[in-house]
Image (tube, grey):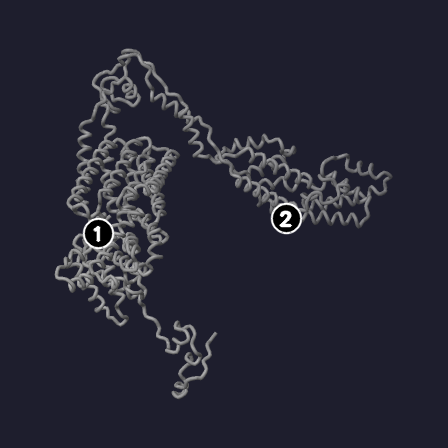
Amino acid sequence: MGIAPNHSSLLPKTTHRISRKWSGRAVIGITFVCLISSLSIRFYSEPRLDIGTFVDQDLRSPKSIEATDIEATRQAKEIAKQQVIPVYRSNPESDANAVKHLEELLQVGDNLRISSGNLPYVDRQILSDDVQRYLRRISEPEWVQLQDKANKLATNVSNQVSTSSAITSAINRDKESPSVALAELTTYKLNALPQDYQKLLNKITEVRRAYAMTQDKAAKGPEMFRDRLLEMSNEEWENCKKLTRQALLDVQSSGIVSGLPDDMLLKRLTNLSNLPINEDHRMMAIALVRSTIKPNLTIDYVGTTERAIKASESVQTQRVALQVGDLIVKGGEKITERQFVILDELKMTQRQVNIKRLILLTLSTALAFGIFGYANQRWQYLLKVKLHVKDLLALGMVCTGSTLATVIMAPNMLVFVPLAGMGLIIGSFYSSRLALLITLLVSGLLTIAISANLLSLAPVLVGAIVAAAITNRPLTRSHLAATGLLVGFLQASVYIAIAIIAGSTPPVLMAITALQYASGGIIAAIVALGAIPYLEHIAYALTPFRLAELANLDRPLLRLLVTETPGTFQHTLFVANLAEAAARELGADTTLVRTGTLYHDIGKTLRPEYFIENQMGQPNPHDLLNDPWESAQIVKEHVSGGIRLAQKYHLPEMLQAFIPEHQGTIAITYFYCQAQKRSDRVYESDFRYVGPIPQSRETGIVMLADACEAALRSLGTDTTLEAAKSLLMRIFETRWNDGQLKDCSLTWEDLDRIAPVFIKVWQERNHGRIKYPNLANKLDPSGSALPDHLCKKDIETSASQTAVPKKISLKN
């Protein structure tokens, strides 16, 4: 970031500059070599006779060998995959839905049978089931005619000696339904009382009417009920329901695959052993099961894929026997993948260093470094970052690790490359602009290094660029996790688009590969979240996550500040509010400013009584000393002592920089003037802080906030905005003319923007209050309890208003 580390004043500044200069060059050189080495791995031993290369003469085997037959091995692996039995997942919900559907159909059948009068509807000793069926379905004229015949036959038979023989003689031993029905009706008429016979006729008439109406309903209902349901007896229907339920459970328990052909399903149903024996009832049960059965097995694509991969991996490598002089590649043809593997095992591919590609890659890397160096020197304000040696080291490690992982995992594992993690890490430490610049440069180098697999690399490059563009010092780790999900979705979408355009990828394989690309984005977020804590100990910059942890008041140094120097702590909080608001206005790092401000006066905890905000009305120790030189030294020691404390508690260097830079090299004016009154030989350097002056906008803002804090506290509520701004601009001008802001990139226009922000924060801190009556001060200064008479409307005379009651009653 934009803060220079604090250095000991014991060594000359020139020595530090030279040391930093050569350290930076060494880091850049090592990074350059590491990147070249990582990107050019495949160029060190590249075959001249590669796949797709034309040969101008026959290539024959120089010796007898058993070489790998990659084509036969691939075919064997593919056959093993195809022969894998799919893995299925059962779905209990489908079974429950099937049972529910069947019960609904059976309820429809129950309702139809109830509305038709059921069967038998009279005692079987009176009429048999077949006769009851016959009497329900005959037409009305046939029913009337049957009654007349029964009456006549009963009259004729009543004069005969033997009733049964007479009826038998009358129907001529006919076993058809009309004759049987006539015989049974006549027999009952002869043996029963007249009123009982009339009840039978009435019951039959009622059932006939209900049966006719139910037949109309059944004709519009389920097809399996139209011809069979109403003709079944109660016992037959209950038995059919029981067997149908059991049949459905048996079929569902054996598993039903989605898309099972109808003829196969029908064959499975007809072969069930627990179906009704009666053919009509059997057909009804099959129809019920067939209409309610639900597929309850779905393919487990992940499990099936894993099984297929294991089956493929278990296939042994296929070998081909070659004899001396056997033809491998015919002259004038291209080398296939199978032929290349055989030639490579025979060491006939003429592997060598690809000088041209190495030179191209070296020049491209040098150009990328040149662009990065120019941007770091000229576009610091645009990139919102100022890099130090440690930052260059961290960037080198991230870029080298990302490129090395990409090159090693290409081509087979490119889908899982966490290249987006590079943008997530750099964006978290620095800014999205720097992350985008580095990601674009590295992407260009990877395009050259893995040009043969560019289509497979494209989704990963797009995901990395987007991740870098949207990661700008996020405040929470959940942002990185969400970005990983977005990158995964984007990589999968880009791959699917490329696959659809190419048009040669099966849908199942496309879906599996898309999921792999999506997992690559999630892996990138996991890698970034895991690497950031370690890189925070290497880089000079700090992530907002780490800054938030360091801003916790339970940290040892801040707890010491709160308990030992409460006045300084209150001063620190006000300065932090001022600085944070100004940083937000200028687009600086607000998290860094606030955390750095919390630690800027930590040195005052060593001798808190020498600072006026902590004296709390006690005598000033400086008056007892009566020595301006010693007092100035004590005041200056709050900087050097603060640095020692920060180093003791391992505070990061970025935050240590706020301790000396918020004071810069300003003069301790009060004691300097006191010294001038006592001696003519006073050296101004004895009354100036050691420095350095602010090296970034963040520390420059804190310097101005610290300088204005006391002045703003001294302003009264009646101070005009113009007077307040004039006061602040005089303080700014003093710092500007003293050269304190020349290295922190703050402009005079920035100072003009900061002053109104400081005033606004001061106004918010010192907001106006309602002026309560004077009497309220004697009762409750907050105004929450007032005398009753002060709250009444002004409707009484002036004399009564001025009258003072002897007793005042307060509201409860």
Which residue is more in the foreground, 290 or 138?
A: 290
At label 2, counting other C-alpha atoms closer than 10 Å, the crowd grade (few under 14, some 14-19, many 20 or more) is some
Residue at the location (75% across, 47% down)? 200
Q: Secondary structure at mark 1?
A: loop
Quarter of the view holding residue 133? top right
Q: Could you say where residue 810 lies in the image, as x and y percent from the top left?
A: 46, 77
Residue 35 place in picture, x, y as percent: 23, 34
Q: Which mark is residue 246?
A: none
Do we see residue 373 in this rendering?
Answer: yes
Whether 225 is drawn above or below 306: the answer is below
Residue at mark 2: 213
As displayed, is residue 381 above or below residue 809? above
The amino acid at mark 2 is Met
Name the one closer to the observer, 379 or 256: 379
Residue 672 in percent (x, y) is at 18, 61
Q: CA distance from mark 2 to mark 1?
A: 95 Å
Would residue 85 be found to the left or right of residue 432 on screen?
A: right
Answer above or below: position of 151 versus 54: below
Q: Which residue carries the number 1 mark?
A: 696
Q: Amino acid at mark 1?
A: Ser
The answer to whether 772 appears left or right of 743 in the picture is right
Nearer to us: label 2 or label 1: 1
Q: Position of residue 234 (x, y in %)?
A: 68, 41
